[in-house]
């Protein structure tokens, strides 16, 4: 048997049988971003995303997908299309104003070691 | 900025172990490789629920049943983490489902083997999840942020899967003659397919070099497979069972276990769709998707009805507000 060996990776079994591109589905449930507060006193933190028809379903799904081991005490969901993000290609210019202001850090100031409680 | 410059900066980030995030520039081939790998990994988690789902109603005790349910639910969760990670690369969930259901995308060939006895639940946990962990731990340091983060979560949860599997086998190994026989039989049937899970043997294909360079992959298939054999050859002793390989032997010089040749013809045959359960698995999956169509449609219709009402109410409220008070 003549087998052509191609290198595949874990979870990657190649595309052996071709196929037509997927038909466009305009009725896909929207995507939601999920934020979880792991315990009282901490911030909500982004954990991932999921699909749901509405906010109530998004929260229920988030409970099942992201808090199966009591990882959270509070869940926020927001439809992904409402998230606005800074552009990584403009990061240089965006953060430039803070780059040269090391005097904003307490360690910038040289004070005598004998000075206490400061 | 031209493409060469971008590609150079991209590689510098990878070399410096800076993660690539969804909005960052990346080479098309990197994106394509990741979409294929992550989505097929996700499909494996989803299809992986089927062989175990087979035993939920027949679990030998309530404790085992609750555990198996939790494990299968975890697999669904793992599939969802991974689908989400793949979606950040610009493919939709429905496209991925379509690729799976049409047979275009593959999933791990291991799930095309049948689960004949309860002991298979143990062997799957120990060997199949064990092999998965061996692969997934390095993937949690993969260069693509969302994939790496998904893998961190998955690895945390996967450890329970492996331990519960080993416990099933350990219990059977202390049982009567029939139970011990069942235990050994399951190990015999799952051992070689588990070794095949690591993928074809290493060769000098340019594809490997590229994925290593991009830090999508950190170890070769053969390195991981060897590690797995070394670990299992020791663990099986706790069960008082044997691995079905007459060539399995400690090699003092290599400080590794030597093992017999893998039947790659069988592997490719299963990958190509001719395994014992390929058709059944895919048909079950497609039917689940089709049977759920009305639910997806109804949930959307309900949401549309609710937001239409809310909109109408807001408009009425506004018009009253603006109306002159004396009317």
Image (cartoon, coloured by chain):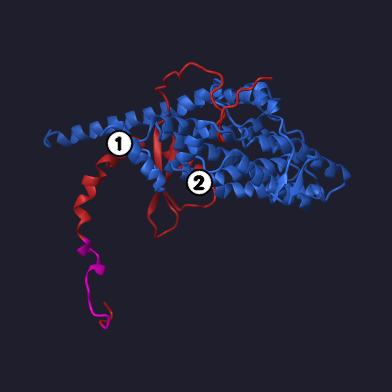
Chain colours: A red, B blue
Q: Does the magenta stretch include residue A113?
A: yes
The structure residue drawn at horizontal position 44% and vertical position 43%, both measured from the top left corner, is B143
The picture places residue A102, in percent across and down from the top left corner, at 22, 62
Q: What are the residue bounds of the magenta stretch? A: A102-114
> Local crowd at mark 2 within 10 Å, few (<14), some, or many (≥20)?
many
Q: Which mark is residue B5?
A: 1
The picture places residue B205, in percent across and down from the top left corner, at 54, 31
Looking at the image, is B305 positioned above or below residue B218?
above
Residue position marked by numbered label 2 in the rendering: B140
Q: In this view, does A18 lie to the left or right of B87?
A: right
Q: Which quadrant of the figure contains the C terminus of chain B? A: top left
Residue A10 in view here: yes
Q: Does the magenta stretch include residue B320?
A: no
> Local crowd at mark 1 within 10 Å, few (<14), some, or many (≥20)?
few
- CA gap between label 1 and label 2 equals 28 Å
Q: Which sits in the foreground, B318 or B43?
A: B43
The picture places residue B279, in percent across and down from the top left corner, at 65, 21
Q: What is the chain letter for disc 1?
A: B
Looking at the image, is B172 positioned above or below residue B195?
below
Residue A53 in view here: no
The structure residue drawn at horizontal position 22% and vertical position 71%, both measured from the top left corner, is A109
């Amino acid at each position: 048997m003549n087998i052509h060996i191609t290198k595949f990776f874990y979870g990657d079994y190649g595309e052996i049988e071709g196929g037509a591109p997927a038909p466009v589905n305009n009725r896909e449930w929207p995507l939601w971003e999920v934020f979880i507060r792991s315990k009282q006193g901490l911030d909500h933190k982004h954990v991932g995303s999921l699909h749901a028809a509405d906010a109530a379903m998004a929260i229920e799904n988030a409970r099942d997908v992201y808090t199966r081991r009591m990882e959270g005490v509070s869940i926020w969901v927001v439809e992904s299309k409402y998230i606005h993000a800074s552009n990584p290609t403009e990061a240089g210019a965006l953060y430039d104003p803070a780059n040269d202001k090391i005097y904003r850090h307490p360690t910038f100031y040289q004070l005598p070691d004998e000075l206490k409680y400061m | 900025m031209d493409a060469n410059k971008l590609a150079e900066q991209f590689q510098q980030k990878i070399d410096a172990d800076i993660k690539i995030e969804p909005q960052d520039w990346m080479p098309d081939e990197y994106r394509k490789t990741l979409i294929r790998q992550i989505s097929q990994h996700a499909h494996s988690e989803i299809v992986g629920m089927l062989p175990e789902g087979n035993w939920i109603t027949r679990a030998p005790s309530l404790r085992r049943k609750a555990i198996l349910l939790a494990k299968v639910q975890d697999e669904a969760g793992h599939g969802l983490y991974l689908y989400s990670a793949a979606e950040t690369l610009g493919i939709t969930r429905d496209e991925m489902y379509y690729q799976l259901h049409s047979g275009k995308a593959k999933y791990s060939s291991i799930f095309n083997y049948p689960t004949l006895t309860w002991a298979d639940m143990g062997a799957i946990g120990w060997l199949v999840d064990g092999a998965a962990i061996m692969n997934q731990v390095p993937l949690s340091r993969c260069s693509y942020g969302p994939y790496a983060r998904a893998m961190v979560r998955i690895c945390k949860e996967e450890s329970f899967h492996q331990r519960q599997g080993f416990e099933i086998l350990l219990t059977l190994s202390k049982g009567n003659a029939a139970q011990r026989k069942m235990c050994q039989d399951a190990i015999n049937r799952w051992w070689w397919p588990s070794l095949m899970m690591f993928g074809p043997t290493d060769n000098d294909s340019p594809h490997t070099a590229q994925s290593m360079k991009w830090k999508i992959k950190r170890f070769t298939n053969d390195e991981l497979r060897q590690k797995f054999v070394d670990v299992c050859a020791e663990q099986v002793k706790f069960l008082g069972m044997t691995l079905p390989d007459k060539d399995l032997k400690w090699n003092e010089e290599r400080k590794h276990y030597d093992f017999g040749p893998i039947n790659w013809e069988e592997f490719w045959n299963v990958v190509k769709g001719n395994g014992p359960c390929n058709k059944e698995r895919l048909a079950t999956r497609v039917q689940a998707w089709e049977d759920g169509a009305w639910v997806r449609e109804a949930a959307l219709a309900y949401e549309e009805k609710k937001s239409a009402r809310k909109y109408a109410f807001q408009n009425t409220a506004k018009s009253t507000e603006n109306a002159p008070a004396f009317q």
